[in-house]
Amino acid sequence: MIDLQAANHTNRELELMLAGKKPLAVFYDEVSCLPHEEIIPEARFAPYVRSGRFVRGEETYIGEYHTGLGREMKIQYVFFALTEEAWRIPALALLLRVRYRMNSHHSEEVERMESALLGYTEEEVDAWCDHRFRRKT
């Protein structure tokens, strides 16, 4: 059985990428909350981008209408990939564009693709989807 807490990459992205155990990290939030180093750790990743070890990408997607903002949400995504895994950035960006356009935030298929792009193993993805979607096995 997979320990989902132990398998989670959250707050360990840089450590895992430097160890070659994670090919892609993604951070995001509503643009009104940015810049914020605790949300998108640009400064922590910047030396590795400058050195060429990582590549960086970013995209903004329009989300649902937010009454508190008085507008549709604008979600800023920042991607960091190992240079040899740079193809994952446009792949995940495409997946996110489709997800936002189709409003399919809770699709198991999309969750599986996103998790695979982020570097989770098939076993970890299966365990996560079993948990998240309460699928019977």
Image: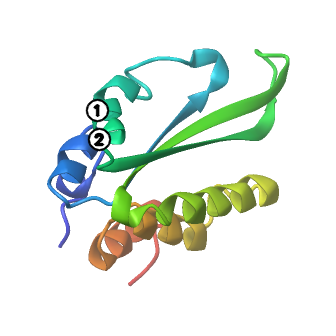
Q: Position of residue 94 (x, y in %)?
A: 66, 62
Q: Does residue 126 sit above or below 16 in this rendering?
A: below
Residue 29 pos. (x, y %): 57, 30
Residue matched to label 1? 47
Q: Residues within 10 Å of mark 1 (few under 14, many from 20)?
A: few
Which amino acid, mark 2? Ser
- State which quarter of the image contains the C terminus: bottom left
Q: Quarter of the image for the N terminus: give it.
A: bottom left
**In the image, is 106 to the left or to the right of 37?**
right
Determine the CA span between mark 2 and mark 1.
6 Å
Q: Amino acid at mark 1?
A: Pro
Out of 64 and 40, give the one closest to the viewer. 40
Q: Nearer the viewer, mark 2 or mark 1?
A: 2
- Residue in front for this viewpoint, 37 or 67: 37
**Residue farthest toward the front in the current orientation of the protein:** 51
- The quarter of the displayed image where residue 24 is located: bottom left
At numbered mark 1, what does the secondary structure look like: helix, strand or loop? Answer: helix
User: Would you say 116 lies left or right of 93 here?
Assistant: left
Q: Position of residue 78 (x, y in %)?
A: 52, 39
The answer to the question of whether label 2 and label 1 lie on touching residues, with beta carbons closer than 8 A, is yes
- Return the x and y of residue 120 as percentages of the image width and height: 32, 66
Q: Residue at x 57, y 40 (%)?
A: 77
Give the SS element for disc 2.
loop
